[in-house]
Image (cartoon, coloured by chain):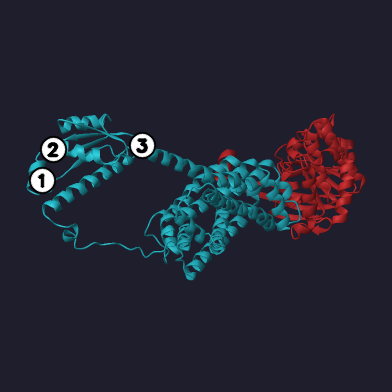
Chain colours: A cyan, B red
Amino acid sequence: MIYRIFRKELLDTLRDRRTLMTMVVIPILVFPITLNIFMEISSSFQESAGDKTMKIGIVGDNTRNYTKQLEAIPASVGPKTIEVFKDSLTLRKAIEKDQIQLGLIIPANEKQLVAQQQTIALNWLLDASEVGRSERAELYSSSLKANAEAKRLQALKLRPEQIRPVIINTINCASDKKMVGQLAGGFLPYIFIAFGFIGCMYPAIDLFTGEKERGTIETLLTVPVLRWKILFGKMMVVVSSGMLAASCALLGLFISIEFLDLADNQELLEVIHSILTPKFILSMLALLLPLVIFFAGLMIPIAIYAKSFKEAQSIITPLNIVVVLPAMVGFFPGITLDITTVFIPVVNVVLATKALIAGTLSLTYFLSVLGMMCTLATLAILVSQKQFGKETNLLL
Amino acid sequence: MITVQDLHKTFSLTKQQRKELHTDARTATAVANLSFTCKPGRIFSLLGPNGAGKTTTLRMLATLITPTSGQITINGINALEHPQEARKHIGFLTGSTGLYARLTPLEIIDYFADLYKVESKDKEARKKYLFDLLNMNDFLHQRIGKLSTGMKQKVSICRTMIHDPSVIIFDEPTSGLDVITAENIIQLIRSCKEQDKTVIFSSHIMSEVDLLCDDLAIVHKGALKYHDTMDSFRTNMGSNNLTEEFIRIVQSPTA
């Protein structure tokens, strides 16, 4: 009988355009659209910054020498024009008015410092809020620095190795999978949790408050079916909707990566493929299922209690923030699954998923998170059942 | 057959409700010591003004809500101890009954037939009988949201009768309906009587009661003010017409 109720409620839910939008269409489209827009905007900014002609203003001692050095830098780095200024104040004003994009201040005693083989401090003036300017200054700096070093070594009759006795390199021992897990691992569970919650929201309101508002609940309660069976049939639809929305979000992400070439780095693609194994997906769903049941168990008592769709929505929508904020914990480095975090709902699922992506999740922690979430899910079901049993909640 | 003995229902009042009702009482009595019997093949009418306790009484009979005290038996089944069993015998229809707008009449009827565990063979026969009787065949596959009020009412009737209940409870079934649509309900009530079913319906319209009922109970503020046959009511009335008599009984301190 529970399955019969589930079938009918699912059919009814799938015919609701609003629910279908939040359950399937938006989760599938959100990644391809947002990632595509982000990548397009980002690359167009980068391209335009690279193609843009930078006007460089130079002020100070020996400007001729520096002009020559800058002119010698190949145009492939980016087109440029050079203008010599009499004082740094005028140069600064020109930069503020965006008449000049980069300003190079050479010390007034540059020739003397060179002769005395002292350190020469070169200063760049720029508007760092504009895309590509810091990067361009960095490129010119490295060229000027290399030229100066070469001249100094030549004057001292030294080889570069003689003044660089040690070169220190850092070798990353973490696997690519672990790196992706740590850097981007917080993102995936966040999306799952957010869409899992949103996916539950409309069906929960529609199947409980909606039935009250439309006057169909009265009829349903007169049939010879135990109330907990009616509740379970409906709850299964709410949970399925949450799981479907989360899965559709994953599908959207997969489509973005596989078909829209939004992740064009081959190594990164290989790492993503090695993460998205059936074992990972099953473990992820195992963690997500009790969490979504918990969400459903939070929303259903509210939906049962509320007298109108509007009232239910006004209570459940702020709950979204309360639930989704802890899911952001995954974005912060250094917070890992431990004896404390394993008992914090939502946070534990985020951290477990992050560890799962990185391949560092132990079976003990996996089972602890699963156990914790199953306990909460059971409690949520019991609260829902209690609320659904109250006649004053069901009949208007 | 429905037997009601000393039925009592009180509701707890919330702070908001106490404020709205201008009372300090923590509970409100909706039904007080109500006793009556509805017999098969007879139409029993529960008459009373708005807020008299009619809907609460019928909801208790339909096992939607539990009485605070008292007894209800449906065809000899104790409805308080065995509500699931009692529900199998009951068909419940209200004037405010809603239908699932995104489903078709056929899907709704199939759904309720399954919930009432109607055998597959019986279900098909019953569906055919009701669809023909109510002339529903032309709109069986259209979504409820696109149907007229009259069509929806036919679907509601069909849903109520799909498990062939022997006890039918109607809570203000013609409320808000036009005369033509209301006629479907009146025909249904008459047909139930002919089939020897037990029928109870609530109303606040005296003319409707006069047209249909065999036995009458008048309730006011949850208490029974009058209970007898309709013939006896007509014979013994002390006013010029039925409506005036109804008002007289409701307003009298003791009836």
In the rendered image, residue A361, in percent from the top left (x then y), is placed at: 46, 66
Q: Mark 2 and mark 1 in contact (Cβ < 8 Å)?
A: yes
Q: Residue extending furthest bottom?
A: A364
| Amino acid, disc 1 | Val
Asked if marks 1 and 2 fall on the same chain, the answer is yes
Q: Chain of mark 1?
A: A
Q: Is residue B26 visible?
A: no
- Quadrant showing the C terminus of chain A: top right
Would residue A369 be found to the left or right of residue A93 on screen?
Answer: right
Q: Chain of mark 3?
A: A
Local secondary structure at mark 3: helix
The one of A161 and B77 positioned closer to us in this rendering:
A161
In the rendered image, residue A268, in percent from the top left (x then y), is placed at: 45, 55
Judging by the rendered image, the residue that carries numbered circle 3 is A51
Which mark identifies residue A62? Answer: 2
Q: Residues within 10 Å of mark 3 (few under 14, many from 20)?
A: some
In the rendered image, residue A332, in percent from the top left (x then y), is placed at: 39, 55
Would residue A362 be found to the left or right of residue A220 on screen?
Answer: left
| Amino acid, disc 2 | Asn
In this rendering, the answer to whether A88 lies above or below A356 is above
Q: Residue at x 10, y 46 (%)?
A: A114
Q: Residues within 10 Å of mark 2 (few under 14, many from 20)?
A: some
Judging by the rendered image, the residue that carries numbered circle 1 is A114
Q: Quadrant of residue B179?
A: top right
